[in-house]
Image (tube, rainbow, N blue to C red):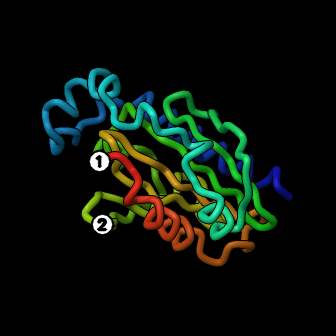
Amino acid sequence: MVSRSLIVGVAGLALVGLAACSGGTSGGGGETGTSEETSAPTSAASGSGLADFDPCSFLTAEELSAAGVSGPGRPANAVESQPGCDFEGENVLLTLSKNETEDFEAYSKNSFEQFDEIDINGRKAARAVTAGSGGQGICSAIISAGGGIVDVNVAGIMRDSVPDPCGEAEKIARQIEPRLPQ
């Protein structure tokens, strides 16, 4: 049961990672950000406010419980540029990850089946489904933080075990937003 959702989730993250690797600076459309963000993603990463953000220790016991999962989490580093941590519950797999190399604008250009921009307390954010993951009970809330993004991914153990994975991911993102670096 876990392996199907885990495989689809990892595949989705891998697709985003591949899109990030292949479309980094040649993809166009990046001119909407500041010149610092688009011209020097490497230097932006070195000064990232996410450098000390640890996805495995960030969530409190109360936040994990409210999300229907428990700790400790397992490192989830399927995509090198997006280290994260998996937390498993009876019906859900929650993955919290960060990407220090792309800001929200650049990240939004990756391969998504759905990318609906929202606002979370004045921060750019989105409800997102990676290409190929539609209808699989998997969704992310992507939120701008520390010069990069934080991704809260919710995947049902079974396709229908989480009725609204995007709503659940957004709920968690809204809970943790006040503690995220600007």
Find the residue positioned furthest to the right.
1
Q: Which residue is mark 1?
A: 182
Given residues 163 and 177, the one toward you in this image is 177
The percent coordinates of residue 121 (x first, y second) are 30, 66
User: How packed is label 2: few (under 14 Cα within 10 Å), some, or many (20 or more)?
Assistant: few
Name which residue type carries label 2: Asn
3D distance between C-alphas at marks 1 and 2: 12 Å
Mark 1 residue element: loop
Q: Is residue 151 above or below residue 116?
A: above
Occupied quadrant, residue 23: top left
The percent coordinates of residue 35 (x first, y second) are 13, 32
User: How packed is label 1: few (under 14 Cα within 10 Å), some, or many (20 or more)?
Assistant: some
The percent coordinates of residue 173 (x first, y second) are 46, 62
Given residues 110 and 140, the one toward you in this image is 140
Q: Please tell me which residue is depicted at 59% across the width and 56% down the height of the picture.
A: 60
Q: Which mark sits nearer the N-terminus, 1 or 2?
A: 2
Name which residue type carries label 1: Gln
Q: Please tell me which residue is depicted at 32% across the width and 22% down the height of the picture.
A: 42
Q: Mark 1 near mark 2, Cβ–Cβ under 8 Å?
A: no
Q: Which residue is mark 2?
A: 121
